[in-house]
Amino acid sequence: MPALPHRSLRVFVATLPEHVPTDGAPFVSIDGSVQSAAVTWDHHVTGEPINLDAMPGAIDAAGFRGIGTTLADTDALASVVAVMAGGVARLPTTALAILRAASHRCDHLVSLPGVDAEVDRLGLGLHGWVGDALAAATDPRASDTFARLCGAVADDVASGRALPFDTSTHDSMADAAAQLDDGGRIRRGAGVALVDLRGVPRIAPEAYYARFPQPVAVAVDDHPQGGPRYTVGVNPFAPERPSDLGSCLAALAGEEFAHGPPARLARPGPGSENWGGRATVFGSPWNYGSRLTPERVAEIIAATLPPG
C-alpha cells in the first residue's frame, strides 16, 4: 500500500497536560484519555476488548498534529498505526489481524479467541518486540521510544514487510516467575494473589499468573515518584474468575481519595487523578505513588470481589 496518509503525526505519551508537546496539538487520544484531546478513542471508557475495537473504520486526521496515549504498550501502538493509516478499515488484512492478535496478548495475556495459530504466533512476537523495547527505554514515559516503535511498524505496514518479531524474553519468563515464587514474592490469599515485583527485572504478567489459581492478582512495583504502584487484573488461567472488577476499582478509588490530594475525585477514571482502568485490569494513579499498602489493597479486593 502507499505511504500511510497520517504517518507524520507526532506521537507522545502524556498523563498530565504539561506532558503534551507544543508541536503535538491539536491531537487525538487513543487507548487512554489524555487531557485536552480533540477526539478520544479509549476502550477503558467505552468497554471494548481491545482499543482497535473502539476506533472507526475511517479516520480523517488531516486537522490534527499529534496522537497521544497515557501508556506506551502494544495495544496503544496498534491504535496509533490505525490512525496513521486513516482508520482500521484502511489497514491491510494480514497486518490488521496481527495487530489485533498482539493487542489481545497485551491486554488479556492470552490468545485472541478464534485466531489462527500462525497469526497468534506473529502477534505474540510483535508484542514481545514492543515490550522489550519499551522496557529498555530511558526517556521519560518512554514517549520518544514509543514514537519510534510506532513509526517503524507503520513503515513496515505501508511497505508490506513482515512486522517485527521477538519472543526471546517471553520464552524465558516462566523461569523468572518460578524464581520470584521461590523467593517468597507471591503470596496466595483468599481469592487474591499478591505479587511483589519491587526491585526485580521485568516479568511478563502471564508468567506469574500461571503459578496460582487465585482469580485476581495484585502486582506491586515502585512508582518513579516514590511509594507503591499497583496493577490489579483478572487471572486468565483461573478456572473460575470474575468478568468485571468495577466494584473493586471503585472501592480502592474511594480509599485513595480519603488520603487527600493529589487525588481529585473519589471515583476512578479520567480526570480523577485516582485509580483507573477497565473491567478486567486496572491500576493505581499515574502521577504519584498510592498511599495504600499492598496488604490493604489485597484486603479491599477480597472484600469487594464479585462472584466468578
Image (spheres, grey):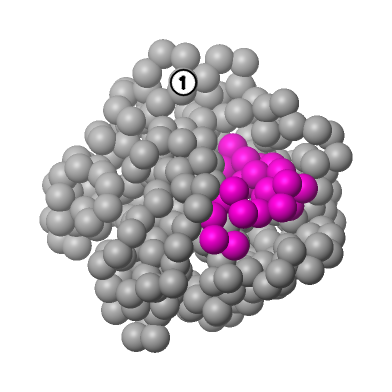
Circle 1 is placed at which residue position? 242
Query: What are the residue bounds of the magenta stretch?
Result: 85-108
- Residue 116 position by quadrant: top right
**In the current view of this chain or complex, which residue is farthest to the bottom?**
23
| Whole-percent x, y for residue 188 in the image | 54, 29
From this view, report whether residue 168 is shown above or below residue 17: above
| Whole-percent x, y for residue 40 in the image | 35, 56
Is 101 contained in the magenta span? yes
At horizontal 74% and vertical 64% (from top left) the residue drawn is 1
- Residue 153 position by quadrant: bottom right
Kindly identify the amino acid type of the residue bearing the numbered disc 1. Pro
Q: Is residue 185 visible?
A: no
Mark 1 surroundings within 10 Å by alpha-carbon count, few (fewer than 14), some (14 through 19), many (20 or more): some
Q: Is residue 8 left or right of residue 1?
A: left
| Whole-percent x, y for residue 147 in the image | 57, 74
Q: Is residue 235 visible?
A: yes
From this view, report whether residue 94 is shown above or below residue 22: above
At horizontal 45% and vertical 63% (from top left) the residue drawn is 60
At horizontal 71% and vertical 34% (from top left) the residue drawn is 111
